[in-house]
Amino acid sequence: MITQSVKMAVTSILSNKLRSLLTMLGIIIGVMSLVVLVSLVNGATGSITDSINALGNNLLNVSISDDHDRPLKLSELSSFTEDDLFESIAPAAASTATATGAYAEESAHLTGTTAAYLDIQGLELESGRFLMKPDLDNHSNVAVINADLATEVLGRTDVVGENVRFNGKRFLIIGVLKEKNTSSNNASDSTLRAYIPYTSLIRLSEDVSLNVTSFCISAAGDDMDAAERQLENILLERFGQDEDAFSIFNQSSVAEAMDSVTGTLSLLLGGIAGISLLVGGIGIMNIMLVSVTERTREIGIRKAIGAGRGTIMLQFLIEALIISLFGCFLGIAFSWIVIETVNIIGSTDYSLSSGIVLLSIAFSVGIGVLFGLYPANRAAKKNPIEALRYN
């Protein structure tokens, strides 16, 4: 009986191709909205999450605004890592300078720091080495630069052993970072950046002194909340319990906030797409009511030769379900085409989310049943005598 009902439903749909296609259009648009939007959000979320994780989720950044006449000295930083909750610490003094090379002259962002900064920030070297303790002790004019600075100022990236001038002072380039490490601390990827010994930056910039006002520290374990609380307690004790004297930025909180934001965004977009599907379902119910009216005499004949109410109801319910599923599969196919087009044009790597595809199929089945139930029931309730008299 079901097989026969399916055949009759397909025949009815194909006999009115244009009307059936227009009926499916609402479902097609709804499924495309759901699949494309959520897949793009998931893809963007994965990319952003990878970028955040590359900066390290065990990182705490501290900025001191008021030292209460108890400034934090460079020599005191190592005392923080005596606590088992912390692994490494490095100052992060920032300044700007004019970088002059053989190729061009540009403004560059300088970071005065120590050897531990490389591991704390998760930077990777393309060539050369990073800063070492003797560089700091000897106030050496050496620099590790990013790929952007090397390209913009020196014309190429293989520049280890060459010189660059910052505000007129000559620095020996001892290392070049990999291109993906061209930014940190939320700086733009296009920032021209150089890392020099903290003690060398003191001599280069009047704004930097042995009093550390900014540093980064990595936690030894996964409990970032405990590490943050311990660091806060240490700083509160030093600065007279003044919570406004410093600020602590927990890198892991960025990932958590991003998960929350993207999760909410996915639900919002999914809800909008769900409304589109509901509108498509109303279209199915409307066209099925028209179909019931057009086929009133057919219903009367089938009832007259013994078809029961359940048989009639099943026939029209299956027809509504097939329309909804056809629209769903077309919507998924068009969604794949759209995503592949976006990948080609934008050189990205988005993909169809299998979970969203399954959800759209399940939702389409529900829409077909929900909005096909009333027309099917109306068809099944028709009086066979009155139906046979209908012209």
Image: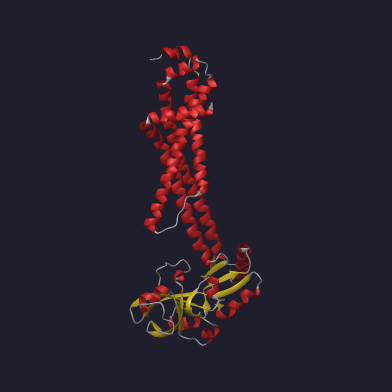
Q: In which quarter of the image is residue 59?
A: bottom right
Q: Vertically, is 379 above or below 103?
A: above
Is residue 210 visible to us here?
yes
Q: Is residue 152 left or right of residue 37?
A: left
At 52% from the left edge and 29% from the top edge, which residue is drawn?
A: 3
- Location of the C terminus by quadrant is top left
- Colouring style: secondary structure
Rendered location of residue 237, percent (x, y): 62, 70
At 54% from the left edge and 22% from the top edge, which residue is drawn?
A: 310
Rendered location of residue 268, percent (x, y): 47, 46
Instruction: Work out which residue is located at the far right of the displayed protein and give it.
Output: 84
The number of numbered discs placed on residues in the rendered structure image is 0
- Location of the N terminus by quadrant is top right
Rendered location of residue 62, percent (x, y): 54, 69
Q: Quadrant of residue 86?
A: bottom right
Which one is in front, 96 or 375? 375
Instruction: Work out which residue is located at the far bottom of the displayed protein and give it.
Output: 138
Q: Vertically, is 110 above or below 6?
A: below
Q: Vertically, is 134 above or below 322?
A: below
Is residue 240 visible to us here?
no
